[in-house]
Image: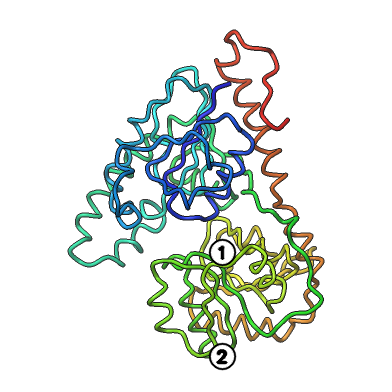
Amino acid sequence: MRVAIVHPWFLVNGGAEQTVNVLASMYPQADFFTAFYREQDLPSNLRGRSINTLSWNWLPAKQQLFRYLLPVYPLAFEALDLRKYDLILSSDSCVTKCILTDQHSVHICYCHSPMRCLWDLHKEFRSSMPSLMRPIFTIASHYVRQCDYAAAQRVDRFVANSKNVAERIQKFYRRESIVVYPPVDTHKGYIDSKTEDYYLSVGRLVATKRIDLVIAACNKLGRKLVIVGSGREEKRLKAMAGPTIDFVGKVSEERLGQLYARCRAFVFAANEDFGIVSVEAQAFGRPVIALGCGGALETVIGENSQGSPATGVYFQEQTVDSLQRAIVGFESLEESFDPMVAQKNARKFDTQHFVSGMRRLVGEAIGRSSFATRTWPTAIRIAGD
């Protein structure tokens, strides 16, 4: 079986890239297609593999330019030549689903989310732009949104990374999807014998992560906050940080584990599709203070949940005051959180569940397609079985 995996770009290292890394291990003979990549940003299982890029990969400033090329991405992904492949897996949070496939090939789209600047966060993205850019963005996003919707109708099977995203797929694309949670290596977690007096934030320093709220709340409360990560918002965030805020940048896996295991709690202020970092924190037995919407409702058990011990607390509004109240509220019942309960909750999202779920889904999709009627063995073995 000839397999292609399509991902928008390898210029950052986040949850989507973590998912593709696991797909790469499941399909060791797969070819990869992407718009741009940098060698240092490739997931470990992609190094040395066949990676096909758009002709623009030579651009020296691609790290800064790729966000501004949105209007041309539908045509660019349509131009990819996927004629020889039987199974195409698209990793989609942009418009990678715009690929064109053969009549007999199977296209499964693992959707991290319908592109948020086109759909549910369109107004927020537009209002954050300089006034001169807004008309351009309005026209461009209207065109790309039409392309994105049309492409969604060509997908053979949608897989959503959460119930939250499955609802968006139904709302915006009018398509059903199956939920397979993204892979998290929860088996690497451990429970430390002691904790230290700091809160923790982990992730790319970009506006959508709302780390500015976490900084502002900890500034006002005088709480120590350790921030792991880097990104284009780093300068602005450092400018607003008080003396209790510590930016440590990118750290080793071992050091990150130590920071997770010893924090008082992990603070998660973003309205995320899923939220891998909050699961990682729980794998180390630590509670999570999370915005009570989006993927957090699936990964964190709030203190008012019925039938299950809590693994964290929610705050209801994406404001500094609401987060402050949640931190103070957490501290009033901090001793009631059980590290073993948090770790058990995290293991529901372990990588093994992603692998088994995707294998089963791919097998079903291929079995129902015209691909299965061609001259192939009755049982198709998927790599890793």
Residue in view at x 67 percent, y 65 percent: 254
11 lies left or right of 381: left
Q: Amino acid at mark 2?
A: Leu
The residue closer to the viewer here, 152 or 199, is 199
If the image is split into quadrants, where does the C terminus sit? Answer: top right
Task: Residue 221: give its label.
Answer: 2
Residue in view at x 65 percent, y 69 percent: 255
SS class, disc 2: helix
Whether tag 1 and tag 2 are in contact, CB under 8 A, the answer is no
Identify whether 158 is placed above or below 198: above
Report the coloring of the rendering.
rainbow
Disc on the earlier residue, 1 or 2: 2
Residue in view at x 38 percent, y 39 percent: 149
The residue closer to the viewer here, 45 or 3, is 45
Give how far apart the Cα atoms at labels 1 and 2 are: 24 Å
263 lies left or right of 148: right
Q: Which residue is mark 1?
A: 293
Identify whether 209 is placed above or below 364: below
The residue closer to the viewer here, 49 or 329, is 49
Q: Position of residue 371 (x, y in %)?
A: 56, 16
